[in-house]
Amino acid sequence: MENFGGMFRSLLFVPGNSQKFIEKSKTLDADIICLDLEDSVPPNQKPLAREMIRGVLSERKSYHSSSALYVRINSVDSGFAVEDLSASVQQGIEGIIVPKVNTEDTIIDTARLVSKLEEERGIVKGHIKLIASIETAQGVLNAYDIAKADGRINALLFGVFDFLYDMHLDYVENNGTGYAYARAKLPVDARAAGALAIDAIWQNVDDTEGLKRDTQYARRLGYSGKSIIHPSQIDPVHKIFVPTKTEIEWAKKVVQSLAPAVENGTATGAGAISLEGRMIDIVHYKLAKSILDLLKS
């Protein structure tokens, strides 16, 4: 539970070029709302999507208070990433999803550009987090190095369909043999690097029972949440990713340790204390509170 800053049970992809879906996303309680500039947006509509996302970020308060707002940019190799970051690194955003990450260099270069934009735009240094999407054999191989490449990394995301394409394998619903190793490796690498892991989407929106089975298996592998593509998937996923006893105990200790500083107004993002050999600060306090608040709901 090192550097996250919120719950990661659900990550909902929302096409960045669809006003209808963007407006709908403002009413949803997914833990992460991810405005997409990549797969769901054709090349000729990417400039429009960037402008729409700028507008959304300027109205950040219109989103559910418990949701974090992320943007998925295009891959570094696409030629769109720099423009995407320029449009996305604004006040109101919590994080960036970087797709098709094969090596730590992609994260280092992206983090450097994000830092530059934060400084230029008066955003607190390090505020914007990064989720690295692992979608190739090379990415799976290098997952640990990617996860620890920069302090902004808070999660790895498994992109199953691109991974299978890279491996020259077909997707077979309810049979994960072709990606079993990769899917099991990511949570281990993420945890070893002090990050979380978010599982791949369940493509069949009408198969809720299949979604539940797939999500339960992901949880047993050590994933903290699942990426989703439809609002109807939020509730089933949330009901499976409930806090563990270990997470609850951790949250209680964090709140107890930091509550005096928070109540006195002396806790800041830059301040930190040691808890059981690890540094914790206001970001961890917010995560701990969100975990304990779930127990009351």
Image (cartoon, helix red, strand yellow):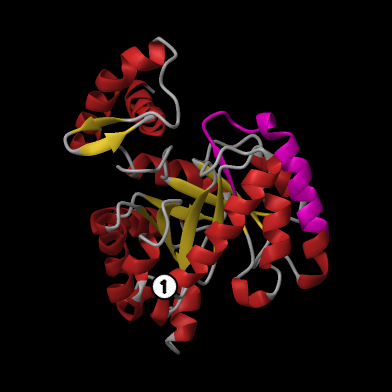
Q: Quadrant of residue 186?
A: bottom left
Where residue 51 appears, as percent x and y from the top left, is 81, 52
Q: What element does badge 1 sit on?
A: loop
67 drawn magenta: yes
Question: Image check: 127 left or right of 42?
Answer: left
- The quadrant of the picture occupied by the C terminus is top left
Q: Nearer the viewer, residue 35 or 273?
A: 273
The answer to whether 254 is drawn above or below residue 221 in the figure is above
Please report the residue visible at 71 percent of the width from the left and 69 percent of the height from the top: 80
Between 120 and 177, the one nearer to me in the picture: 120
Magenta residues? 48-71
Q: Is residue 133 left or right of residue 142?
A: right
Residue extending furthest toward the top: 264
* Amino acid at the residue labelled 1: Glu
Residue 148 in picture, x, y percent from top left: 35, 60
The outermost residue toward the bottom is 168
Q: Position of residue 137 (x, y in %)?
A: 39, 81
Q: Quadrant of the N terminus?
A: top left
The residue furthest left is: 276
Please give the name of the residue rendered at 31% of the width and 33% of the height, measured from the top-left corner. 280
Residue 38 appears in which quarter of the rendering?
bottom right
Q: Residue at x 30, y 52 (%)?
A: 194
Q: From the viewer's perspective, is 244 left or right of 265? A: left
Q: How many marks?
A: 1
Number of residues whose C-alpha sits closer than 10 Å to that of mark 1, classed few (under 14), some (14–19) or many (20 or more): few
Residue 249 place in picture, x, y as percent: 20, 30
Based on the displayed image, in which of its 4 quarters is residue 59 positioned?
top right
For this rendering, which residue is in front, 170 or 16? 16
The residue that appears at 37% across and 53% down in the rendered structure is 212
Q: Would residue 132 be counted in the magenta stretch?
A: no
Q: Is residue 201 visible?
A: no
**Label 1, on which residue?**
173
